[in-house]
Image (tube, rainbow, N blue to C red):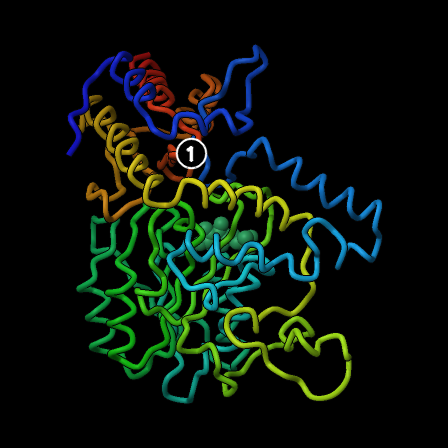
Amino acid sequence: MFDYKLGLDFALKQDQDDPLRAYRHQFHIPKDSKNNHLIYMTGNSLGLQPKHTKSYVNQELEDWATLGVEGHFEAKNPWLGYHELLTKAMANVVGAKPIETIVMNTLTANLHFMMVSFYQPTKTRYKIVIESDAFPSDKYAVESQLRHHGFDEKEGVILWKPRKGETLLNYEDLEAILDHQGDEIALIMIGGVNYYTGQFFDLKRIATLGHKHKCVVGFDCAHGAGNVQLNLHDSGADFAVWCTYKYLNAGPGSLAGCFVHERHAYRTDLNRFTGWWSHNKATRFNMRGEFDQLPGAEGWQLSNPPILSMAAIKASLDMFAEVGMEKLTAKSKKLTGYFEFLLKALGEDVIRIITPNNPNARGCQLSIQVKNADKLLHKKLTKAGVVSDWRAPDVIRCAPTPFYNSFEDVYRLVEKLKAILNE
Ligand SMILES: *Cc1c(COP(=O)(O)O)cnc(C)c1O
């Protein structure tokens, strides 16, 4: 695809020619004790802070200080409808329509609220399919839903597993699961991009397959949102959830996103937990009378939301709106491809990349296995100024993000890794 070359000059030239190069300077990049920038490769865990976030949050603090309760109407961005300022930009990030998109709650909470509506087990159709390497929180959530409905969690969870000696998942194996047990399965709940391997699944293929067998299909896109083009609407998935503190750079524990496909927007037959924020906006404050469901994903809200967290999300989404996922993913593919090229040059007998090598089947993260490595390698990398992530027993995850990582970052990371391996 790209004609990569070894050597620092190549990296510097790529940075010079990078149409997104200015954005790196719009983020706070952590530094070491000597005031040198760290090589930050954990945007998949906690995205960095945009420099303008502080002013967005300060705006709300000031409006609160000067206006008190009137801020709901009189603030520069009135709090009453603040979440609406996020909807369109968030919908664009995940490839959804505004009516399908809402920012609310936190990720695992949203997963539960979605299962309240979309996991409707019967005596014979109650099982849930997840990846064998699903993120622990997702696994716990799914198991607790089974228990909540009176089913045995061991028997009720079906794992989509890699084949013996392999790490990635094959669609044929999911098809086989559905062919054999399709009529027992109520829900397929998959991480859109697997947090461990970095495998980006074909969401449409999984949703189509699930629907063919009359299963509900949902995705946890925590590692996908802001990283890859999810095209949630076109995928046909019933629901999706994601967080905003990873690739969406909205701060630790910030509010999460939720997608409900348009075809469910006006349904009133679904079970759901509701609150005053699920109620028709026009009559919400009458505080009287019958519940009147808001249509679309908004109708799953419960509470008036935390504005300070939403301000940080707005700061980030304004940047995403300015650049667009197309340009971000174009750079991302080039940057991660470069990373892969340099790692392969270290010798494929030493380094094994478990993330798919097809750029369309991954995001920016590469999960790397180093022969005979243990946690000491990660410790040394950290000491050398690389912020990466260690997953026992032997995987280092590095996610060069297109917004703030440079080709030089990737070059220096691999040089440091090489130096440690040669010790
Ligand atoms: C990061 C992540 C979580 C974390 O859940 P929170 O509710 O935000 O704490 C859950 N699931 C997946 C797949 C994740 O990547």
Q: Compare residues 73 and 208 and report the one nearer the observer.
A: 73
The residue depicted at 55 percent of the width and 59 percent of the height is 103
Q: Compare residues 104 and 323 and report the one nearer the observer.
A: 323
User: In the rendering, at what x and y percent does residue 408 appear?
Assistant: 35, 19
Say if 213 sits above or below 422 in the image.
Answer: below
**Residue 130 vs residue 342: left or right?**
right
Q: Secondary structure under badge 1?
A: loop
Can you say which quadrant of the picture contains the N terminus? top left
The residue depicted at 56 percent of the width and 13 percent of the height is 35
Can you say which quadrant of the picture contains the C terminus? top left
Say if 164 sits above or below 249 in the image.
Answer: below
The residue depicted at 58 percent of the width and 31 percent of the height is 51
Q: Compare residues 233 and 217 and report the one nearer the observer.
A: 233
> The residue under label 1 is which amino acid type?
Phe
Specify few, some or many for label 1: CA neighbours under 10 Å numbering under 14, 14-19, or 20 or more: many
Q: Compare residues 129 and 243 and report the one nearer the observer.
A: 243
Q: Is residue 156 visible?
A: yes
**Residue 72 vs residue 109: left or right?**
right
Q: In which quarter of the image is residue 11?
A: top left
Q: Is residue 181 visible?
A: no
Residue that mark 1 sits on: 403
**Residue 304 vs residue 15: left or right?**
right
**Residue 150 vs residue 79: left or right?**
left
User: In the rendering, at what x and y percent does residue 133 appear?
Assistant: 36, 54
User: In the rendering, at what x and y percent does residue 237 appear?
Assistant: 35, 68
Q: Quadrant of residue 298?
A: bottom right
